[in-house]
Amino acid sequence: MTKTFLLSAVFAAAVSSQVFAADAVETIPQAPVAVDVASAFSWSGPYLGLHGGYGWGEVSDGAGGEDDFDGGRFGVFAGYNWQMANGFVVGVEGDVNYDWNENDYDLGGGATGEIDTGFSGSVRGRVGYAADRALLYVAGGWTATNLSVDGGGVNDDDTLHGWTLGAGVDYAFTDNMFGRLEYRYNDYSDGDIAGFEPDFEQHVVQVGLGVKF
């Protein structure tokens, strides 16, 4: 009887230890599997770039006369973006440009004069939506340009102040380099040059290349 009891106890202990060991093995947590998740691109941060294009303008002299005023443009731009969690982007941007807008006018007797613009610039607010590496935006704000007249005994210039509104798309080729295509409408309002009040408005299409820091 005693032998039987002892054998039963040993058998029960052996079975219990095996079940416990099996259960312990089953409950050992597995090591986490490494997952390589690429971080999403963000437009947040400062940027700097160059742009160039062409402008189609029109000047009225305040006395009923109008003339086309077209030419190329080259400039630099810089700004800062803040990207929201929902993909919307807000920012501020400034630029300085040189415009080759010029035209000759007839003074009579074979003489001609020249009207042209040189440096221009703007400060604009931007609102856009980012679809990964593509940023669609609208922008508007203050703009100014210098307009000069030379000929016929007149040699004068004035800085015209106005407003600008436009839209464009930025596309990031890499994490730091992006391209741009943009349209702008500039209304420089009017100035005062030798008693005349010229009014200048302009349509601009330009492309650019920028670096995001």
Image (cartoon, rainbow, N blue to C red):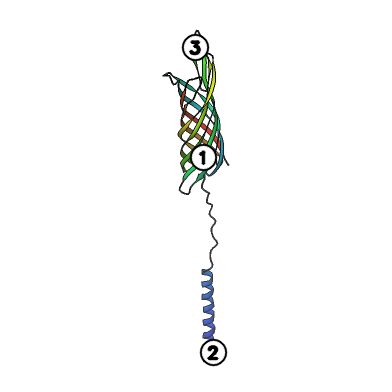
Residue plotted at (48% across, 31% down): 162
Badge 3 vs badge 2, beta-carbon distance below 8 Å: no
Q: Which residue is mark 2?
A: 3
Mark 3 vs mark 2, foreground winner is 3
Residue plotted at (50% across, 32% down): 143
Question: Which secondary structure, mark 3?
Answer: strand
- Circle 1: is it few (<14), some (14-19), or many (20+) Cα within 10 Å? some
Q: Relative to 125, say whether 108 is above or below.
A: above
Front one among 37 and 76: 76
Give the quadrant of residue 78: top right
Q: Give the residue type that dot 3 points to.
A: Leu
- Total numbered labels: 3
| Residue placed furthest toward the left | 64
Give the quadrant of residue 156: top right
- Circle 3: is it few (<14), some (14-19), or many (20+) Cα within 10 Å? few
Q: Of marks 2 and 1, which one's residue comes earlier in the chain?
A: 2
| Residue placed furthest toward the top | 109
Question: Which secondary structure, mark 1?
Answer: strand
Question: Which secondary structure, mark 2?
Answer: helix
For residue 92, the mark is 1
